[in-house]
Image (cartoon, helix red, strand yellow):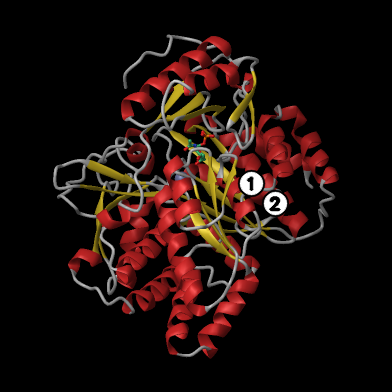
């Protein structure tokens, strides 16, 4: 390590005084103007991680679903996964180190993780907005002697794909943007060829791109799959602001359509978030009512279809669905009682869901906000490929379909483009309209709120965040409130990405869900050190 050079270059990416950040569920995320030093330092860290794992590491510069003034950065581990927990801690230490402590922190990390500093390092970089910030990452990589490839503009899941391809010797796919487009589109076109229902109804989709990178990438990709699907893009970045009044996060949390998109009744529409790793669907019914189809219903559609295919080819593989506490109670009940698919609940944040999903032959995981994918174990993939060769006609067809679905899913990460193509293929194959899909079950009315407190760490939770352990008395208060309503449930947890406490409530009517959420917010405000104005009723 050339410590002199590090000190010299680090000074060019100086840390604002007193700024403390934490590597959370989504990496570092804050105002873009405060991120230059973090980018440089994450370049350094990626080199150390690459040396340690003897693999290519990814660095993605993205604001995801945050407002336009923000930006962020996350590291991608060798198999396209989120960064390992111990390295998240190193990332936090390094980002917060004062200039004079940088050398010590870097040496500490290298020693703790037994990094061989002689080892070569390779880092791939992607960004969905700021070129300047990604240049700071590159500065960090180079000063530690790492090699790099800058992919320039990519969606977050595309960068995960690149990392995965590079570390699996090209077996998974080619680590180029064309490789990604070709792999997914070929599988999609093959799959939809099997569909007996054609007609425009199944073949056209309106996509709200949140004024983010998804628009650019879908536009590049659309001619690869246009045989099977035609997409009409909205909020493509030509005018509006990133994630402002549009995008998956807005649609899900406000339970209304994005601005800038004209929706005719019963038209199938979807929204991506800013970096295209989340997707939600929706439509207006004939009476003009808005219907949201969230990650839970997406997981239900996908897992049911996969289960049907497995039955057809006569394979008894274990399939599981992984959700978080935010999953609508109706979805959990439907999956368990009607579909007879086992459901598991983990803490919020895809890394937790991903980890749990790896325990199954086929693990389908989605957050209610539309972030998710399906994972297939290598053994299952082999088995299905063999079946596609050997089985007789009807079974072979099902095995082929499964093979295509495996190719379509970005198994390295939840990917809005992959998910969209899988969903579109399933709807076409099953001849399902968006209303029929929506009618699988009825969501329980729900409400999500935020409460400002002095220190959100006073709230700690257990049971996959469904029970509050501290502060004392809070869980008892929530229990008493929940008892007042029918089919009700509520929980609170500190956000991992914003300085707020999140409150979730569901009940038999929207009015009850709203009341319950408000009452729980008041309990949080009183018992967990609320600041500012007391939570007001009404939304
Ligand atoms: P926090 O801020 O910890 O609630 C949010 C989402 C997560 C996940 C992360 C990362 C909700 C309730 N929370 O986390 O699901 O997507 O952002 O982007 O949607
Ligand atoms: Zn995102």
Quarter of the view holding residue 175: bottom right
Mark 1, other Cα within 10 Å: few <14 / some 14–19 / many ≥20: many
- Kindly identify which numbered label has been placed on residue 429: none
Q: How many angstroms separate mark 2 from mark 1 (CA)? A: 7 Å
Q: Is residue 55 left or right of residue 109?
A: left
Query: Which residue occupies 44% across, 76% down?
Result: 401
Query: Which residue occupies 41% across, 32% down?
Result: 69
Secondary structure state at the residue bearing disc 2: helix
Q: Is residue 436 left or right of residue 97?
A: left
- State the image coordinates of residue 351 (x, y, percent, origin top left): 60, 47
Give the labeled residue for mark 2. 47
Q: Is residue 243 left or right of residue 405?
A: left
- State the image coordinates of residue 313 (x, y, percent, origin top left): 50, 79
Above or below, 427 against 478 in this view is below
Query: Which residue occupies 43% across, 69% down?
Result: 184
- State the image coordinates of residue 474 (x, y, percent, origin top left): 59, 17
Secondary structure state at the residue bearing disc 1: helix
Q: Are marks 2 and 1 in contact (CB under 8 Å)?
A: yes
- State the image coordinates of residue 276 (x, y, percent, origin top left): 42, 51
**Viewer-side residue, 428 vs 149:** 428
Say if residue 151 shows up in the picture.
no
Above or below, 454 against 246 in this view is above
Give the labeled residue for mark 1. 43
Quarter of the view holding residue 267: bottom left
* Mark 1 residue CB less than 8 A from any atom of ligand 2: no
Query: Which residue occupies 36% across, 32% down?
Result: 508
Say if residue 386 shows up in the picture.
yes
Q: Quadrant of the C terminus?
A: top left
């Amino acid at each position: 390590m050339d410590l002199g050079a590090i000190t010299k270059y680090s000074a060019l990416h100086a840390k604002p005084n007193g700024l403390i950040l934490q590597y959370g569920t989504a990496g570092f995320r804050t105002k873009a103007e405060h991120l230059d030093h973090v980018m440089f330092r994450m370049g350094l860290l990626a080199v150390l991680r690459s040396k340690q794992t003897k693999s290519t590491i990814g660095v993605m510069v993205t604001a995801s679903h945050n407002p336009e003034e923000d930006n962020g950065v996350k590291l991608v581990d060798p198999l396209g996964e989120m960064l390992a927990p111990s390295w998240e801690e190193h990332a936090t230490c390094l980002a917060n180190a004062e200039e004079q402590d940088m050398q010590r922190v870097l040496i500490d990390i290298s020693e703790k993780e037994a990094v061989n500093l002689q080892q070569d390092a390779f880092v791939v970089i992607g960004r969905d907005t700021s070129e300047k910030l990604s240049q700071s990452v590159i500065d960090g990589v180079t000063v530690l002697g790492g090699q790099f490839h800058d992919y320039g503009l990519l969606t977050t899941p595309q960068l995960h794909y690149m990392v995965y391809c590079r570390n699996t010797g090209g077996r998974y796919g080619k680590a180029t943007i064309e490789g990604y487009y070709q792999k997914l589109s070929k599988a999609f076109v093959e799959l939809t060829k099997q569909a007996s229902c054609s007609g425009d109804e199944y073949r056209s989709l309106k996509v709200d791109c949140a004024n983010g990178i998804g628009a650019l990438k879908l536009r590049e990709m659309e001619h690869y799959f246009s045989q099977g699907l035609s997409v009409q893009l909205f909020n493509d970045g030509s005018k509006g602001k990133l994630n402002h009044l549009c995008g998956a996060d807005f649609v899900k949390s406000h339970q209304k359509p994005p601005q800038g998109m004209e929706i005719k009744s019963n038209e199938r529409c979807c929204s991506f978030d800013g970096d295209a790793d989340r997707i939600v669907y929706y439509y207006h019914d004939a009476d003009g009512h808005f219907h949201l189809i969230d990650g839970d219903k997406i997981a239900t559609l996908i897992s049911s279809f996969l289960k049907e295919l497995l039955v057809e080819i006569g394979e008894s593989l274990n399939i599981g669905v992984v959700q978080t506490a935010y999953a609508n109670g109706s979805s959990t009940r439907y999956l368990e009682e009607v579909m007879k698919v086992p459901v598991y609940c983990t803490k919020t944040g895809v890394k937790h869901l991903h980890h749990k999903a790896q325990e199954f032959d086929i693990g389908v995981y989605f957050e209610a906000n539309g972030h998710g994918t399906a994972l297939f174990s290598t053994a299952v993939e082999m088995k299905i490929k063999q079946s596609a060769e050997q089985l007789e006609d009807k079974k072979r067809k099902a095995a082929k379909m499964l093979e295509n679905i495996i190719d379509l899913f970005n198994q390295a990460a939840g990917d809005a483009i992959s998910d969209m193509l899988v969903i579109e293929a399933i709807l076409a194959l099953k001849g399902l309209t968006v209303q029929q899909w929506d009618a699988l079950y009825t969501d329980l009315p729900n409400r999500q709120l935020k409460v400002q407190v002095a220190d959100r760490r006073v709230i700690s939770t257990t049971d996959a965040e469904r029970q509050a352990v501290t502060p004392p008395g809070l869980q008892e208060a929530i229990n008493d409130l929940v008892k007042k309503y029918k089919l009700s449930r509520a929980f609170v947890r500190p956000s991992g990405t914003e300085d707020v406490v999140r409150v979730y409530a569901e009940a038999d009517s929207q009015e009850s869900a709203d009341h319950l959420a408000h009452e729980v917010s008041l309990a949080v405000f009183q018992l967990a050190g609320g600041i500012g104005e007391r939570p007001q009723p009404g939304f």
